[in-house]
Image (spheres, grey):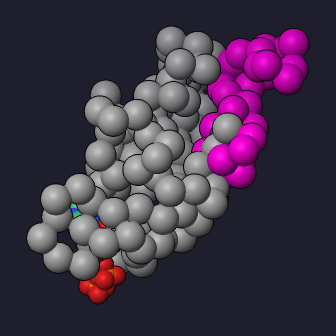
Amino acid sequence: MPEWKLVTEFTFDSAHYIKDYDGPCGRMHGHTYKVRMEAKSSQLHSSEFCPHPVMVADFRTLRWAKQDVTKGGLDHCVLNEVLPPEYETTAEMIAKYIYDRTKQQLPPNVELKVRVSETANSWVEYHE
Ligand SMILES: Nc1nc2c(c(=O)[nH]1)N=C([C@H](O)[C@H](O)COP(=O)(O)OP(=O)(O)OP(=O)(O)O)CN2
Ligand SMILES: [Zn+2]
């Protein structure tokens, strides 16, 4: 079966602290988070912005988190104040949050994978 794989990367700059963390990460500090989104599908779809079935997923839909927080993204915010309380601000849970919010906007047959890195040396990947 034919399959398309879309990959898009972006960054956002935000502050966070890890609640009850015994060490520097427990204090407010910032990262340039690097995010890589992968979307796979064997079918093409329309999008919020395009009525024709010509995309796995719209790059604009996959890149929502890079927008300023005042426009619904995660850029230039304190993540602890923006993420719902069930998501801690570890890279693991930020990746899950981005995954969960993005998945709600995609057709069900699109397979999604989200990678988040806080530093050049460490990253996490989340998918279902
Ligand atoms: N599994 C996880 N471990 C840690 C996370 C995380 O999200 N998931 N986050 C942190 C902190 O947020 C911290 O900012 C990162 O700390 P650290 O790895 O020490 O980053 P450095 O750039 O300072 O690391 P170097 O080794 O100096 O490059 C901690 N752990
Ligand atoms: Zn951190």
Name, please, the residue furthest toward the left. 22
Residue 14: x and y, percent? 54, 63
Residue 38: x and y, percent? 52, 42
Can see residue 27?
yes
Residue 115 is left or right of residue 38, and the answer is: left
Q: Quadrant of the C terminus?
A: top left
Residue 108 in magenta stretch: no
The residue lying at 66 percent from left, 47 percent from top is 69
- Classify 95 as above or below 2: below
> Which quadrant holds residue 60?
top right
Magenta span: 44-71
> Which quadrant holds residue 2?
top right
What main secondary structure does the magenta stretch of the protein show? loop
The front one of 18 and 60 is 18
The residue lying at 87 percent from left, 20 percent from top is 50
Residue 100: x and y, percent? 44, 28
The residue lying at 16 percent from left, 59 percent from top is 20
Residue 104 is left or right of residue 80, and the answer is: right
The front one of 91 and 18 is 18
